[in-house]
Structures are given as structure tokens and as C-alpha cells.
Amino acid sequence: MTPSDVKATLSFSDGSPNIDLPIYKGSVGPDVIDIRKLYAQTGKFTYDPGFLSTASCNSSITYIDGDKGELLYRGYPIEQLATNCDFLDTCHLLLYGELPNAQKKADFDKLVTNHTMVNEQMQFFLRGFRRDAHPMAVMTGLVGGMSAFYHDSTDINNPEHREIAAIRLIAKMPTLVAMAYKYSIGQPLIYPRNDLGYTANFMHMMFATPCEKYEPNEVLVRAMDRIFILHADHEQNASTSTVRLCGSSGTNPFAAIAAGVACLWGPAHGGANEAALNMLEEIQRNGGVEKVGEFIKQVKDKNSNVKLMGFGHRVYKNYDPRAKLMRETCHEVLNALGLHDDPLFKLAMALEKIALEDEYFVARKLYPNVDFYSGIVQRAIGIPVNLFTAIFALARTVGWIAQLNEMIGDPEYKIGRPRQLFVGSNSRDVKPLAQR
């Protein structure tokens, strides 16, 4: 990082001396004011709840322009990656900085494939959970538990350990998600198949049984692969920041990723597609397509508590580029499965039409987001709603690892230690019990 010739001057109205703060320019995006020496020079901190105006790191992995509706992985537009690459190409890009050539792709795909099985004892760990446990509760335990089985890749400061942990996590996450699903429905666990591609193998582990052969449908495999690509990374969001903060203490990679899984579980983050489907099912129970107008009136009513889930985005103030891609996939899947007449999907399409045309939503830029469409696609494929967030975690794992590795390789990184504005009691004395 090279500071700009321009500096920011901080002045005080109480006569304290002004101080100059360096400004750094990114390759794209807003400039940042370096406040690292602010406390030493002024005795003051900045106040930024939610870190909405604070850059916590420098990164070369993912760039988002929310106003333009742009998402780049290592400089490549998400539209091109989702159209021309598969998920493992995207994993290679995020981990190593470049898309693989034919030989590197073959080697990387084979390496991941050879690590898809999990230690057999993980099954006994799985059986300790109730069958009706939420899959994210199970996933948090299983991912954290991996550090107990793979001792040869738990030193976060050893590049070889980080490399093998990255491959293991990317390879084993589909196996763990499928295990959690099969366990919840009481079916036998299905082992990975090395003759299938990454996403087809996941679908096989999810839907095959020992008594019936399952042939992955190409349209559905492509749809699921696209879901993985679109969710692979998304800059410094809550779960990624959690992984970085957790990893900054020097904890092992499996623990750091388990922290990311736990953070993603929140309904405001990874649970958004689950919430969108639950909303659709609620409308369907209350009258379906015929009652959409009534539901929209409630959404617009400031005094009602009705929320429109799956629309709008914290960062994108334009149409989420991932949503455009997922919309195409959504219609492809519904056509391939002949589901356009399914009541829930008809309802979803009616809601989409209103949101894209109604001035209330257009003016507020409440476009359908990626969660809205990915939830519909996953339901059509046959994935239960409570598994959606676990699939999001599967896809986001590679982004978390890439961000964690980048942080550890950054000579400026330190253990995270946010500051606070304290508004509690001043120092006071403890009174004897009789006087309290």
C-alpha cells in the first residue's frame, strides 16, 4: 500500500492541534483514511457501530460496487465466472489468484476429489445429535470437530497446513452437509463417488439411497453449481469478518471456519433464503396468489410488522448481479422440472413481477435478491428449507479460507481488538452487604 500525496486533516474546535492522516487509494473503490495512529496522537477513538465506514483490512480477493451492482472475484465479473466456469475453477481462482489452465484444473479437481471422504468416526459424532436438530447446529459441531481428526493441518501459521486444511474443507463440506441431511431423515449415509464431479457428487450423496440408483440431472447440477459460485465470497461481510477475527488469534483453520458457520446461521445473513421461502409458504397458507395484493399492502403499511423477505440488499443499491444470474437459473430449473404451475412457484413469480414493476419497490430499489431465487431453486431441486443455510456455508467455505489465508500472509495483520465508547458507571466502591 502506498499513501496518496493528498492527506486528510482532522481539526478540533477546542483549539487542539490539527493532525494529518494518510490516505490510501485502492485499485478500485473508495479511498481510505488511515486512522491507526489516531489514538496515539489524540487520545481519541473513532465510533462506527457495525463498522459501516471502516475498512478492517486490505484485500485483493473480492470487490463489490453496490451502486453499480458489480461483483468481481479477483477482477473477474461474477457474470462471466457463473457462465464460463464451474465451482472448482472459482475455488482455484479465490485460493490462488488465477483461473486454472487445463492441466492445473485436472490436478486441482483430482486433489479435491481425493479428499471428499471424512474420517469414519465423524459418524459417531453425528449420532450424538438429535435427529430434529437444525442442520446448522450439526454443521457448527462437525466443522469444529474436524480439528480433532486432522491434526496434521491445524497450525494456522504453517503454509503447508493451511494448504491441506483448505483442500480438506472444500472437499469435505459437501459430505458433511449430506451427512447432516441423511441423518435428519433417518436414511443411510451415502459415501462420495470419485467418478462424479464436485456438484454431481454432492447431489448423489444427498439423494441416492442404497436401494435405488440416483442419476444427477444435468440441469439441476448446473443450477446447484451456480448457487455455489454465486455464494463463494462476498467481501468483508459478517461471517467473513468473523473468520478473520477468529483466525487473528492464531486458532486452527477448522475452528475459524466453524465460527464463520455459526455467524452465517443468523437469519439476517445466511438464513435470508430460508426466511424468503418461509414467507412464501406463509402467504400460500393464507390464500396464495389471490392474496398477494393484500400482502403487498401490509408490506407498504408502516404500522404493520409484515416484512418482504428476499428483496433488497445491504450493499447493492442496484439489482444484485447474482440475482440476475439466479433468476435465469430459477426459470431453467422450473421449466426442466415442469413446475411453473406449482402453486408456490406461481406465487413467487407473481411477487417477483410486482416487485419489479410497482413504483413503491422500484423507488426503494427493493429488487429480488439472490436469496429469493436461490431458495426457490433449492426447493424445486428437493432440498428442505432448513438445509439452505448449510448449503450457503458449503459454498462460502472457499471464500472464508481465501480471506483467512490472505490475512495470515499480511505482514500488517494483528489480533483483532475493536474499541468502545464506554457509557457505564464511573469508578465506585463496593458497600458492605448490609448497606446495599
Image (tube, helix red, strand yellow):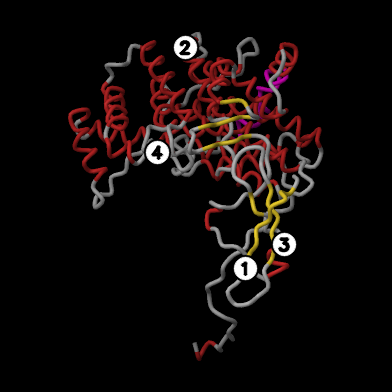
Quadrant position of residue 111: top right
Residue type of the residue flagged with mark 4: Gly
Q: CA distance from mark 4 to mark 2?
A: 28 Å
* Label 1 with label 4: CB-CB less than 8 Å: no
Residue at the image point whose x is 72% and y is 39% from the top: 406
* Label 3 with label 4: CB-CB less than 8 Å: no
Q: As drawn, is 42 to the left or to the right of 381?
A: right
Label 4 neighbour load within 10 Å: few <14, some 14-19, many 20+: many
Q: Is residue 99 above or below residue 295?
A: above
Q: Secondary structure at mark 3?
A: loop
* Label 4 with label 2: CB-CB less than 8 Å: no
Q: Is residue 75 above or below residue 6?
A: above
Q: CA distance from mark 1 to mark 3?
A: 15 Å
Pick the quarter of the image with the N terminus. Answer: top right
Marked residue nearer the N-terminal end (3 or 2):
3
Q: Which residue is mark 3?
A: 37
Q: As drawn, is 293 to the left or to the right of 162?
A: left
Mark 3 vs mark 4, foreground winner is 3
Label 1 neighbour load within 10 Å: few <14, some 14-19, many 20+: few
Marked residue nearer the N-terminal end (1 or 4):
1
Q: Which residue is mark 2?
A: 219
Quadrant position of residue 376: top left
Q: Secondary structure at mark 1?
A: loop
Mark 1 vs mark 4, foreground winner is 1
- Residue lying furthest front in this view? 5
Q: Position of residue 6 (x, y in %)?
A: 69, 52
Q: Secondary structure at mark 4?
A: loop
Marked residue nearer the N-terminal end (1 or 2):
1
What is the magenta range? Answer: 111-125
Q: Is residue 379 above or below residue 244?
A: above
Q: Which residue is mark 4?
A: 312
